[in-house]
Image (spheres, rainbow, N blue to C red):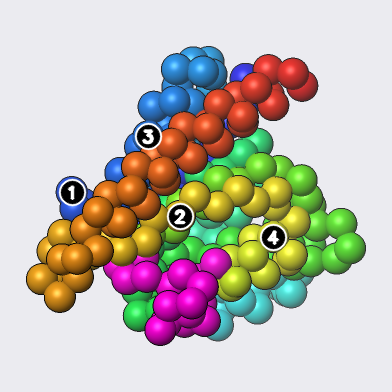
Amino acid sequence: MAHLLHIDSSLFSEASVSKEIARTFRQTWAAEHPDGVVTYRDLGAEPVPPLTEAALFAVQVPEDERTPEQVAALRTRTELVDEVLAADAYLIAVPMYNWGVVGSFKVWLDQIVLVGKTAGGDQPPLAGRPATVVLSYGGGYFPGTPREGWDFVQPYLETVLGKAMGLDLTFVTAQLTLAERNPAMADLIPQAKEQRAQAHQAAEASARELAARFAAA
């Protein structure tokens, strides 16, 4: 029985493409692996507090020497890190905001990236655990487009989640998500719809592959 940690980070509750595609993954996962356990966090609806100096340095202080402020600050970080460690697999949905990851997700990352516990070394503690990462982009950042090279989301996550934390990453991407709401992008609507449909298909495929992986374990 596999344990999936699902992280949403969009600020939107209903109009979020990244959440919509992540739901497709979850529905397929539930059908293929009905006995699985899911822990869910919506960082847009319930943001985690930012990392503080007290929480950052408390881990370097012996437990019996920590100040009350350090103990309190570390409580949240420990809870979030323990959630990550308890999971066998991850579903992470991240929209691009201002050419980078949304702030709520960056705050969560700052809390859970902890050298020796979740990251670092030649063999990170989470090495090999599968993670499906759903990315949504309002514009287009395809090769050959004017904004090729402006994507600071996937390369960043490849570094943090893939290299530092050692997760086995599968990216599911939908671009041009603002085409139907931005009149200046109206001619891109057919391509946007195709992108979205392909992302849903990729999410389904990733969920099935993950279920098969745990079934064979």
| Residue 142 x %, y % | 46, 69
CA gap, disc 2 to disc 3? 13 Å
In front: label 3 or label 4? 3
Q: Kindly indicate the quadrant of the structure image that contains residue 101.
A: bottom left
Report the magenta residues as a range: 137-154
User: Which residue has dot 4 on it?
Assistant: 162
Q: Secondary structure at mark 3?
A: helix
CA gap, disc 3 to disc 4? 23 Å
CA gap, disc 2 to disc 4? 17 Å
Going from N to C along the chain, the mark reached first, 2 or 3, is 3
Q: Secondary structure at mark 4?
A: helix
Q: Is residue 132 left or right of residue 194?
A: right
User: Which residue has dot 2 on it?
Assistant: 173
The kind of residue tagged 4 is Gly
Q: Is residue 100 above or below residue 24?
A: below
CA gap, disc 1 to disc 4? 29 Å
| Residue 154 x %, y % | 55, 67
Residue drawn where x is 24% and y is 64% of the image: 188
* Circles 1, 4 touching at the beta carbon (< 8 Å): no
The kind of residue tagged 1 is Glu
| Residue 63 x %, y % | 71, 64
In front: label 2 or label 4? 2
